[in-house]
Image (cartoon, grey):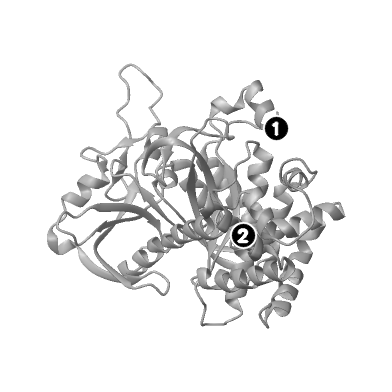
Amino acid sequence: MLPRNAPAWLDRLSAWLEPFEACFGHVAQRGAFRRYLLGLLSDSRRKSMSAMLARISAPGSYEAFQHFITEAPWTAEQVWRCLRATIPDREGVLILDGTSFPKQGTHSVGVARQYCGTLGKIANCQVAVTAALWTGTRAWMLGARLYLPEAWLTRAARQRARIPATGVFQEKWRSALTLLRQVRTSGITVTAVLGDAEFGDNATLRRALYRAKLPYALGVSSTLTVFTSTPTLTAPAPLVGKSRPRTQRLLAPGVASVAVSVLAADQPANAWRIITWRNGTNRSWRARFFAHRVTPAHDWRERRIAPEVWLLCERDLGSTPRTKYYLVDLPATTSLKALVQLAHQRWAIEQQYQELKDELGLDHFEGRSLPGWQRHVVLTALAYAWLQVERGRRGARLPTLPIARAVITEILTAHFFATHPHYLDTMLKLREISLRI
């Protein structure tokens, strides 16, 4: 028997999906689109196409399901644009990050031996750059681009994985900036940008954020070098025998850059303050922090002086404390607690990846083509957005995303058994037969 709230839930889902149907040019595609979303929301533990199709009550063969996700003429980017235009939250911090998909074989598009954040080591995996909007209560995945190592851009690899001939190699930081532009173009107000050291170590990305007047809090490596203030420059001495003076300015005597790890290690104990912060509604955390205004030194290689920013150093309270480093572009008057609060909003992306993978099968796609991967990921993001919309119906008392999905799974499971009344009897008979063998 279906739960009493099933009709209302199905009506809300239908209304949510209606704007996206314009992305699909044929009625068969629109039907497959709805079936795929129901499959992602179902109780299937594995979100492969065969497993999802087995758990939803809908017509259509596996071949038609596969054709929709890998061959049918629709583009993932059009669905991303519609998603960015549809989400109810229009302002928040944008979190740029990479997520990895461990793989056993070598045929999945983009797979290579590279750093795998999921495993914490070099491994065989795919890596995607993603952008997520965090509002303080809900996260929305608004874009994803698969990183393609140069070995995947040969003619043979392109044909095998259906990678467009126009595609060129793009570093992860360039993909991140592309996603940022797409989000801002959609009319969403980005109040700050967050990211880990893969993005924070890149001076070009930091310059782009500065030019866009976007505050940021980016992790950086311990080896990144800075000046401890805006460096003083001096005019060079004229060359002997030359009438024209030298114009290129030099660092003043005694001015030198220093690694952020060295700067942090030189600070006395009383320079560090214990700050308490909370990630969303989770329990509070505490650590020691030190902050100092610095000028990143990398730009000086091109004889440019970078804008002054905050260096935020974090040291945990364990017996063998580890130190993390961030560059934070906020005004010089910003309090230490405000620096910490901005930098630590990155936790939302870690929670989102866990929910997308555990609840919706973000990393379960088994196809090998780039279009198939792109389509599975955007539809997973769409299913995730629908769950966030359902959570928002409770107002300030937001249920966790797993609880929201559990309610929806109950409805889908009840619907499955209502439309397959003999399924359970068949499974029991098969079990009895297996026990006799």
- Crowding at mark 1 (Cα within 10 Å: few <14, some 14-19, many 20+): few
Disc number at residue 429?
Answer: 2
Which residue is at a point 29% across and 53% down the rendered structure image? 324
Residue 12: image x %, image y %?
Answer: 72, 74
**Which residue matches tag 1?**
164
Residue furthest to the top in view is: 241
Residue 73: image x %, image y %?
Answer: 80, 43
Dot 2 or dot 1, earlier in sequence: 1
Task: Kindly indicate the quadrant of the structure image that contains residue 122.
Answer: top left
- Which element carries disc 1, helix, strand or loop? loop
Q: Is residue 211 visible?
A: no
Which residue is at a point 71% across and 68% down the rendered structure image? 421
Which quadrant is home to the N terminus? bottom right
Amino acid carrying mark 2 in the image: Lys
**Mark 2 vs mark 1, CA separation in Å:** 50 Å
Task: Kindly indicate the quadrant of the structure image that contains residue 276.
Answer: bottom left
Disc number at residue 276?
Answer: none
Which residue is at a point 39% across and 21% down the rendered structure image? 243
Residue 256: image x %, image y %?
Answer: 25, 39
Residue 106: image x %, image y %?
Answer: 53, 30
